[in-house]
């Protein structure tokens, strides 16, 4: 994938990970992200899936630290990252094939926004460091029943 083929996202989370190879296996092989570019010498990778973009960087206690507290697993407590995908079923199949445990099983949910509901087929899974990902497939919208 070439960087000129991508529209850069305005917000890109950077995940500090304990093992870049293990994280790349999860994010790329299981979830379906592609490496747009990496800096292997810095244990860094920039990933993309559709319009979703994330960065992974392996923790290095000797590097300039941006962490605001002690790094203890599960990382990212109190936040989940919603990632819209074309279809959740292929991802679920890959996770099941390798015995990867889901945090919340697949479900259909409708979320109200004023007089409209937005539907999504979703599930939650933790990456190897405990970051919580909510993968969603858009089911469209409908008027709220009166």
Image: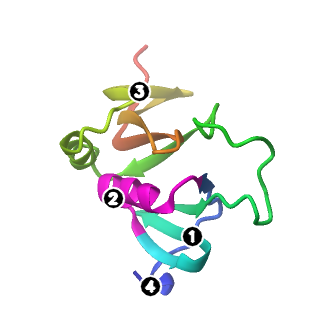
Question: Foreground residue, 94 or 115?
Answer: 94
Q: Which comes sooner in the sequence, label 4 or label 1?
A: 4
- The circle on residue 2 is 4
Foreground mark, 4 or 1, reads: 1
Mark 1–mark 3 Cα distance, whole angstroms, equals 39 Å
Label 1 belongs to which residue? 43
Q: CA distance from mark 1 to mark 2?
A: 20 Å
Image marks 1 and 2: residues in contact by CB distance under 8 Å: no
Q: Which mark is residue 32?
A: 2
Residue 8 higher or lower than 140, as above or below: below
Query: Which residue: 32% across, 27% down?
Result: 105
Above or below — where is 64 with respect to 37? above
Please state the horizontal and vertical placement of residue 43, each as a whole percent of the image.
Answer: 57, 70
Name the residue located 81 percent from the left edge and 46 percent from the top edge.
68
- Which dot marks residue 34? none
Residue 79 image point, x, y percent: 62, 36
- Residue designated by label 3: 110
Name the side, left or right, on which 143 lies relative to 139: right
Q: Is residue 52 visible?
A: no
Q: Looking at the image, is mark 3 or mark 2 nearer the viewer?
A: 2
Specify start and end residues of the magenta stretch as a single range: 17-34
Viewer-nearest of labels 1 and 3?
1
């Amino acid at each position: 994938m070439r960087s000129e083929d991508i529209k850069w996202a305005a917000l890109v989370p950077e995940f500090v990970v304990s093992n870049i190879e293990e994280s790349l296996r999860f994010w790329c092989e299981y979830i379906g992200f592609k490496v747009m570019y990496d800096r292997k010498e810095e244990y860094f990778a920039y990933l993309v899936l559709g319009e979703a973009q994330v960065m992974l960087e392996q923790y290095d206690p000797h590097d300039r630290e941006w962490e605001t507290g002690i790094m203890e697993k599960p990382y990212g407590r109190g936040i989940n990252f919603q990632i819209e995908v074309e279809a959740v079923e292929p991802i679920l199949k890959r996770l099941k094939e390798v015995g990867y445990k889901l945090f919340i099983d697949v479900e259909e949910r409708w979320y109200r926004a004023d007089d409209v509901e937005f539907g999504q087929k979703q599930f939650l899974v933790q990456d190897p460091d405990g970051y919580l990902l909510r993968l969603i497939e858009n089911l469209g919208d409908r008027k709220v029943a009166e």
